[in-house]
Image (spheres, rainbow, N blue to C red):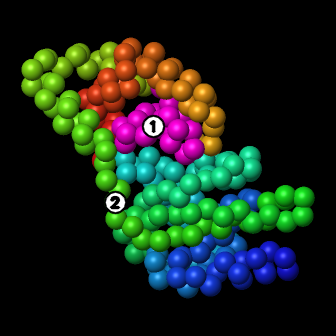
Amino acid sequence: MELEHMLGLVSHTADGVMAVDAEHRIVAWNPAAQELLGFSAEDALGRICHTLLQGTDRYGNPLCLPECAPMSCVRQGGLVRNFDFQVQRKDGERQWLNVSIIPLRGEGGRLLAVVHLLRATAEPARTGLLVEEVLRLLTQREPAPPARPAADHLQGLTAREREILHLLCEGASTATIATRLCVAPKTARNHIDRILHKLGAGSRLEAVALALRQGNCSR
């Protein structure tokens, strides 16, 4: 009853509302969410959220996973800033959404549900385009480095390091990366340092340039 009351309070909004429990099952889906994505409450309720939305970033990397970063952050008691991602509508079209996360907690801080407020948005601007232009001008003057070593180095990155490299391609700062991944800024810096070491890059810009040359920061 406590959860029903809380969900009732947040469901009456023009934003789409999707709430999931601790096992990622959808427990609330309002009419605005149906209008936004085409799925009815009957389609959505009881489904595991990542299997319904199939959310990705602008590069096609999956964001909706069995253990996604926002849910991990909420479980650790952290705050999640609103972010943009692309999801699958019922008609098969991809839709860009901006989402805000609201954890609902009961007695003793027990996590009851996580509310996602969904609103349509345009595809976010790519700050990485500036880097691509710099790279284009540089490669007009200098021959590109051999592709094989760079490709080998990129393949040596972990999944988390690839995620951070994509954020660097977007121009994200250390603070932004730390907030997005719900880690301490020092941890984010350590990840970035390891990426630079693995790529043999002397700077973040050089690491992004290597990724761009290999198509790892493209749409």
User: Where does residue 16 sit, x and y in percent of width and height?
Assistant: 54, 76
Instruction: Identify residue for label 2.
Output: 123
The residue located at (37%, 39%) in the rendering is: 171
Instruction: Identify residue for label 1.
Output: 173
Q: Is residue 160 magenta?
A: yes
SS of the residue under disc 2: loop
Q: CA distance from mark 1 to mark 2?
A: 20 Å
Left or right: residue 82 versus residue 198 is right
Left or right: residue 201 versus residue 64 is left
Instruction: State the extent of the magenta-drawn residues as a range.
Output: 157-180
Tell me, yes or no, whether the two marked residues, 1 and 2, touch with CB atoms within 8 Å: no
User: Where does residue 47 sit, x and y in percent of width and height?
Assistant: 64, 68
Tell me which amino acid carries mark 1.
Ser
Q: Is residue 96 magenta?
A: no
User: Where does residue 117 sit, x and y in percent of width and height?
Assistant: 57, 70
The residue located at (79%, 81%) in the rendering is: 5
Residue 128 in sight here: yes
Tell me which amino acid carries mark 2.
Glu
SS of the residue under disc 1: loop
User: Where does residue 86 sit, x and y in percent of width and height?
Assistant: 43, 60
Q: Nearer the viewer, residue 26 or 121?
A: 121
Of circles 1 and 2, the one toward us is: 1
**Count of numbered marks:** 2
Disc 2 crowd rating (10 Å Cα; few below 14, some 14-19, many 20+) is some
Left or right: residue 171 versus residue 4 is left
Magenta portion: prevailing SS class: helix
The residue located at (37%, 51%) in the rendering is: 58
Disc 1 crowd rating (10 Å Cα; few below 14, some 14-19, many 20+) is some
Which residue lies most toward the right here? 108
Residue 81 tag number:
none
Location of residue 27 by image quarter:
bottom right
Whether residue 30 is situated above or below residue 175 in the rendered picture: below
